[in-house]
Amino acid sequence: MNFSNFFISRPIFATVLAIILTLVGAMAMRILPIEQYPSVVPPTVSVQAQFPGADAETVAQTVAAPLAEAINGVEDMLYMTSNSADNGTMSLSVAFNIGTDGDINTINVNNRVQGALSQLPEAVQSQGVTVELRSDSILMLVALTSPSGDYNNVYMQNYATLNILDELRQVPGVGNAEVLGGGEFAMRIWMDPDKLAQYDLTPSEVASAIRAQNTEIPAGNLAATPQSEPRAYTYTITAGGRLSSPDDFRNIFLRTNADGSSLRLEDVARIELGASFYGVDARLNGATMTPIIINQQPGANALETANSVRATMEDLAERFPPGLEYVTPYDTTLFIDASVETVLKTFIEAFLIVIVILFIFLQNWRFTVIAMSVVPVSVIGTFAGFYL
């Protein structure tokens, strides 16, 4: 008895098996991820640091080298690349074997980075070193715009950072969301070289004065223990703390002049509230925009994730200030939807053609229906194999 005769002589068993295959395949269809391109690249962990004021060579020697030496040899690592720029930024990427757990890889790299922090310059440690699982799969791009021109790019970038990014990062399936450019509000201090020379000051002296007076210092208590005589009340002294406005920075004391007058920061520099980074100028149809790049989490369903992102943005848009809107200039799920529709259309056309051909040769509708019943079972059952 050959393989086919076994099922022919047992029609009930064959029917039950076909139903089970169809049900398992149908369930697998709902679980399998849908993406524009399959994940065929190694999972990558990104390490980023910043050394303000340092050139690329200094960053490579004092930041990239210690981190690379500490991370080298981490479990399941394939290769590692680093890039140091003249703006003081350092980006190090660690690629791992395909199929490894990205979260475990991130933890392993972070443990190595923590062990190397003491070797980094103090300025780098104060800025912080970030370790995150990087997803190269861009799902969509959301952009904030101000059609009426009420808000500039700095305001929109800061608004996105404070009110939108955290909400998008919590959407299931989103690997990461970041503002392109990252120009958050920052106090910009533009020193005048001529005035510095006039008052015999150096930029490092000005920077030291800013650091010394822009800090949180505990002021202590009055009538607190220990003391010789008990007091009925204890008073906590609250100091001003860190500076927050341009006027606060303008009044930073630098030194006392020979005539007894005070030299302040406003005498040698121009202070204004601006952006922390001016390296990106994004525009949409000639107007300023703030792009938010949304990366897909590895293995997530692109269509479901994109729908969740759209729903989240609709909820957030209800709280936007007047004159602020959002658009979606780039969405990969549009291509995915078109591809799925094309596949379904092709499948239906092929199914109808096969029915016609079978009927022409069999000349019997009953035999044709029996033969065609195999098609959905085999197609849907294939998804169960994909899931396994």
Image (cartoon, rainbow, N blue to C red):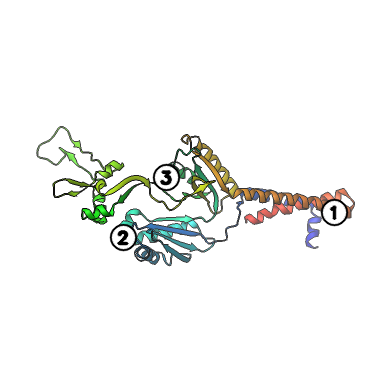
Q: Pinpoint residue 228: horizontal percent, then vertical percent.
A: 9, 39
Please give left or right for residue 379 compared with residue 32 in the image: right
Q: Residues within 10 Å of mark 1 (few under 14, many from 20)?
A: some
Q: Amino acid at mark 1?
A: Leu
Q: CA distance from mark 3 to mark 1?
A: 66 Å
Of mark 2 and mark 3, the one earlier in the sequence is 2
Is residue 25 found left or right of 362 in the rendered image?
Answer: left
Q: Which mark is residue 368?
A: none
Q: Whole-percent x and y of residue 194?
A: 26, 54
- One can see residue 130 in this view: yes
Left or right, 25 with reference to 46: right
Q: Is residue 239 above or below residue 24?
A: above
* The one of 30 and 318 positioned closer to us in this rendering: 318
Front-most of 278 and 316?
278
Q: Residue at x 27, y 45 (%)?
A: 249
Q: What residue does disc 1 label?
A: 358
Could you tell which of marks 3 and 1 lies nearer the N-terminus? 3
Please name the amino acid that badge 3 sits on.
Answer: Val
- Which mark is on residue 154? 3
Name the residue beneath numbered marker 2: 121
